[in-house]
Amino acid sequence: MVVLTPTVLDTRSTPWTMGWVAILLGALAVQMLLALVDHLAPDADRPEHDDVPEA
């Protein structure tokens, strides 16, 4: 994902530009957090060791 910052666009840093950059960085941080939670969460269809019935 490429974030077009004012240095890339070679323009002045205006408040709305900084606002959009903050929104994009926040969205990226949320996506990374959701991916981390999904990676760390146990699978719902796989039973835990305590839930496995004894044979």
Image (spheres, rainbow, N blue to C red):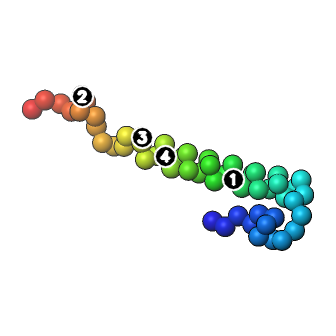
Left or right: residue 3 compared with residue 51: right
Is 42 placed above or below 15 here?
above
Question: Which of pointers 3 and 2 indicates the residue nearer the eye?
Answer: 3
**Quadrant of the image occupied by residue 45:** top left
Q: Where's the C terminus, which quadrant?
A: top left
Q: How far apart in space, not on screen, are marks 2 and 4 (Cα)?
A: 25 Å
Q: Nearer the viewer, residue 3 or 34?
A: 3
Amino acid at pointer 1: Leu
Task: Identify the residue under disc 2.
Answer: 50
Q: How far apart in space, not on screen, are marks 2 and 1 (Cα)?
A: 41 Å
Question: Which of pointers 3 and 4 indicates the residue nearer the eye?
Answer: 4
Task: Identify the residue under disc 3.
Answer: 41
Q: Earlier in the sequence, mark 1 or mark 3?
A: 1
Q: Position of residue 52 (x, y in %)?
A: 21, 33
Amino acid at pointer 2: Asp
Label drawn at residue 45: none
Label drawn at residue 25: 1
Q: How far apart in space, not on screen, are marks 1 and 3 (Cα)?
A: 24 Å
What residue do we see at 25% from left, 30% from top?
51
Instruction: Check disc 3 and report its element: helix, strand or loop.
Output: loop
**Contact check, label 1 and label 4, Cβ < 8 Å:** no
Amino acid at pointer 4: Leu
Q: How far apart in space, not on screen, are marks 1 and 4 (Cα)?
A: 17 Å
Q: Earlier in the sequence, mark 3 or mark 4?
A: 4
Instruction: Check disc 1 and report its element: helix, strand or loop.
Output: helix
